[in-house]
Amino acid sequence: MSEHFLTHDGINIKFTIIRKNVKNINLRVRPDSNVVVSAPKSVSCESIEQLVKDKASWIIKKIEHFDRKRSNNGRLEYITGEIFQYLGSSYPLKVIQVKSREEVILDGEELFLFVKDENNFKIKEKLFNQWYKAQAKLIFHRTMDKIQPPVSAAGIERPSITLRSMRTRWGSCSWKRKKITLNIELIKTPLECIEYVLLHELIHFKHHKHDTKFYSYLENLMPDWKERKKTLKTFSVNLSKL
Ligand SMILES: [Zn+2]
């Protein structure tokens, strides 16, 4: 493993070369914005550097993409002007100091955080987590009202919904307990994605595995599920499982 640097259009790119028993060179930008090249021992450092140079614009775009993602998802500060995601839209926050009731309110296009001490990060974080959770509960149940009736003919009953913060999954299904678990983060994605995840989990009550029966049933009920899945992917670099 060795670290290298090069400059492209005035921007420094740091990349790590990992020597492996592989046939081809593999260049990746990881979600933590680190650039990693795995390459066979036979390939010279100069050729790898040339490859990184050729791909520099793409790499920089990727790094910026991941940096933006992380600043949205990981390091929230809850300050005025910061962007928050809700149902696939971005809302700039307005923090307003109040003496009485502390709460988060989405009023049309405007997202407000009313808080007594605008420097108290813990309280602000708690208020936002509570708000997201309450919205998720409301929207997920409402979506279930729409998505479940069409599958009831196939014997799929309405399950209970549990909300959770999960690191790798958007949702999961426990057919024994007649329960589906949904990631609270899903409330940040468009309604069409929430519908897709819900339907996906519902179908698991009938077809436990991702086999051809599962997919033909899904395709039948939601012909554009692949596009919805693609959209969902753009909302998180870590979450993928269903
Ligand atoms: Zn699944």
Image (cartoon, helix red, strand yellow):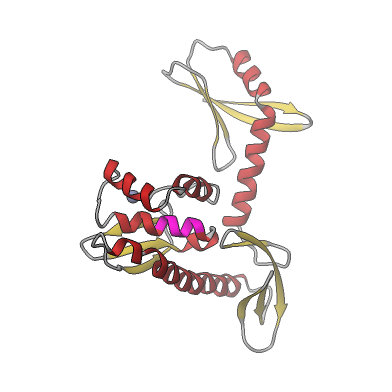
Query: What residue do we see at 51% from left, 20% from top?
Result: 25
Q: What span is in magenta?
A: 192-197
Instruction: Give 159 or 33, whichever is nearer the viewer.
Output: 159
Residue 195 drawn in magenta? yes
Q: Is residue 155 above or below residue 63?
A: below
Residue 116 visible in rendering: yes
Query: What residue do we see at 68% from left, 22% from top?
Result: 53
Relative placement, left or right, of 160 versus 75 is left
Residue 176 drawn in magenta? no
Query: What residue do we see at 46% from left, 64% from top?
Result: 184
Rendering coords of residue 92 (x, y %): 70, 64
Relative placement, left or right, of 8 versus 138 is right
Q: Is residue 97 above or below residue 239?
A: below
Rendering coords of residue 100 (x, y %): 65, 89
Rendering coords of residue 19 (x, y %): 48, 20
Q: Is residue 67 above or below residue 4?
A: below
Q: Is residue 137 above or below residue 219?
A: below
Tally of marks: 0
Q: Residue furthest right?
A: 10
Residue 74 visible in rendering: no
Query: What residue do we see at 39% from left, 63% from top?
Result: 147
Instruction: Give 136 or 37, whichever is nearer the viewer.
Output: 136
Rendering coords of residue 76 (x, y %): 62, 61
Relative placement, left or right, of 34 versus 198 is right
Relative placement, left or right, of 24 versus 56 is left
Q: Residue furthest left?
A: 176
Main SS, magenta residues: helix
Q: Residue furthest bottom?
A: 100
